Structures are given as structure tokens and as C-alpha cells.
Image (cartoon, rainbow, N blue to C red):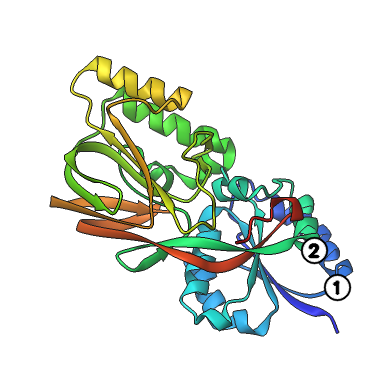
Amino acid sequence: MPKKLFLMFNPSSGKSQIKAELWNVIDIFVKGGYDVTVYPTQKRYDAHDVITERSEEFDTVVVCGGDGTLSEAVQGLVSLPLEKRVTLGYIPGGSTNDFGYSLGIPFEIPAAAREIVNGTPINCDCGTLNGKPYLYISAFGIFTDVSYETPQKMKNQLGHAAYLIEAVKRLSLNKYSYYHLKVESEEIEIEDDFILGLVSNTTSIGGLKNRSEYAPLLNDGLFECALIKYPSNPAELQNILTALVTQNFDCPSLVKFTTKKVKFKSNEPIKWTTDGEDGGEHTEVTVEVVHNAYKIIVDNDNDEEE
């Protein structure tokens, strides 16, 4: 009896390549022994709602879209009891596909589909910000609202370059502020002024690859925390930019560590983002790792399950 597969795709992601490849993808899954149900998402958060309502009907749920669509699906999945969380497959179809890169998934749509047919499920972590799940990154500060404030049409036309254009525009206008924060975890306790903070579980952010010793594993129960202190003069700013470009993090203005839980406290509300979407304004934030929150299919060579 064929296994049941639910193929959910975002028709607006990236340059909408999935529309041209849809029948090919369905054929790959059918030949792989699946009975396929196809669903195009209709609105924001639709992936979350449909996963919550329908995932129990299927053996595998495949998400095709950008990291935002996958994030919605994972958020819906982890809201269910552990025993009801079906295995995920992911076909990257967005503008940057950071998480797909981290998982080693091909960006060619048919190749990603074949990997789902032939691959192996691995456990994967997710995070929570004040108890709300997210896929791979929470952040505050400079550039962190670039993703959701960059027009979708611009993302579709220019891909990753759209994010860089928006970020460079802001930097050239000195459009950034600093935030006075207390940061506490088992690994560190620090109070200072920061222009950027990231708590992530990815080897790529905004299309920029993390090749440092701090690059995280996706199922080790730890997230990477990176903080950039406010530069008091142009020389400090240049040192920060050089450190980021060269990924040589021996810089006094950069603080990096891995953690399973970290708390942020500020006197004034700070705007946060989760997976590139608006995460609300908070004076206190607790970010915590949910270890082995769900299973996702990857190529056998990339199997890192613990």
C-alpha cells in the first residue's frame, strides 16, 4: 500500500520555480511509492494551520517554499504532541534558503525531491522565544528586519541580492541604534550596549555562510549566540566588519558562544525577529533550545542523527 505524502508549496516563494516543476516533483514521489496530495498555501500562517489540522492523515509532509514557509510548518508541527509529529521533507524554493543550505539539501527542485525519496530522517532542534517556537534564528538590532521589510517582489526578482541591497542602504545611512542589555546564560554573563544579537541554529544567515568554529550542528541541543557591541568610533566599526567578512572572531566587539538557554533583559522594549518575521517587542526575552523537536529527511551522507 502506498505511503501517504502531503506536498504543501508556497506559490509566491522565490521565483515560483515550483510551478514549472510541480508535475515532475509529483511524478518523482509517485515513482518513489507515495500517494501524493498537493496543497498550495493560501495566506500567511497557512502552513502552520494546515500542518496542525491535517498532518496526522499522512506519513510524510513535504514543504516547498522559503525558510519562512518551512518555519510555519515546523511551528505547527511542534505544537503537536511528540508522538503525532510526522516526518518532514523540504524542497527549498525561496530567495536565500538558509536552512536548506544548512541541511545540505540541493536547491534544484527535482534533486531535492529525489533526496526525500531516497534520504533518511534525522532529528533536528528548534528554538523558542518566550515559549513561542521558531525554526532557526531569533534576532534583534541592525539588519534584522531587512527580511520582512524587503518587498516580496524585490526578493523574487533579485533573490539574495535584495537583502544585501537593503542592508547596505541602511549601513550607508547609519540607520542603526544600540540597545543596553543584560545577557545571562550558563556560559556567560555580560551587560553592555549592542547593535545586533543573533541566536541561531544554521550555517547560513541571509545567504552568508558561517564557516567558523562556532558553526552549529543542527541536532546537538545547542544554539549559537552572537552579539555585536556598539562601535564607539569608525575604527571599531571597521574591525567588526573585517571580523565578519573574514570570520576571524578574535575581536573585542564580538561576543560568541553556544548555549541551550539564554536570557536578555533591557529597560526599553526591543524589537525582535524570528526566522525573518516580526517577533514582537520585549523587555525580557528567554531563548531556549528544544532538542530533537522534529524529524526531517536529508541525504544519507548528511545523516548526523544522535
Left or right, 1 with respect to 58, comes to right
Closer-to-camera residue (32/212): 212
The answer to whether residue 244 is visible is yes
Q: Amino acid at mark 2?
A: Val
Left or right, 203 with respect to 182, comes to right
Left or right, 166 with respect to 216, comes to left
At horizontal 20% and vertical 18% (from top left) the residue drawn is 233
Which quadrant of the figure contains the N terminus? bottom right
Q: Are marks 1 and 2 in contact (CB under 8 Å)?
A: yes
At horizontal 15% and vertical 50% (from top left) the residue drawn is 266
- Provide residue 188's location: percent of width, then percent of height: 26, 46
Q: Which mark is residue 269?
A: none
Left or right, 105 with respect to 306, comes to right
At horizontal 47% and vertical 36% (from top left) the residue drawn is 163
At horizontal 17% and vertical 53% (from top left) the residue drawn is 265
- Provide residue 287's location: percent of width, then percent of height: 33, 58
Find the distance from the CA under tag 1 to the CA under tag 2: 8 Å
- Provide residue 254's location: percent of width, then percent of height: 31, 32
Secondary structure at numbered mark 1? loop
Q: Which residue is mark 1?
A: 33
Q: Amino acid at mark 1?
A: Gly
Secondary structure at numbered mark 2? helix
Q: Which residue is mark 2?
A: 117
117 w.r.t. 250: above or below: below
25 w.r.t. 159: above or below: below
- Outermost right residue: 31
- Examine the image and state in which quarter residue 56 appears: bottom right
Mark 2, Cα crowd under 10 Å, few <14 / some 14-19 / many 20+, is many
Which quadrant of the figure contains the C terminus? bottom right
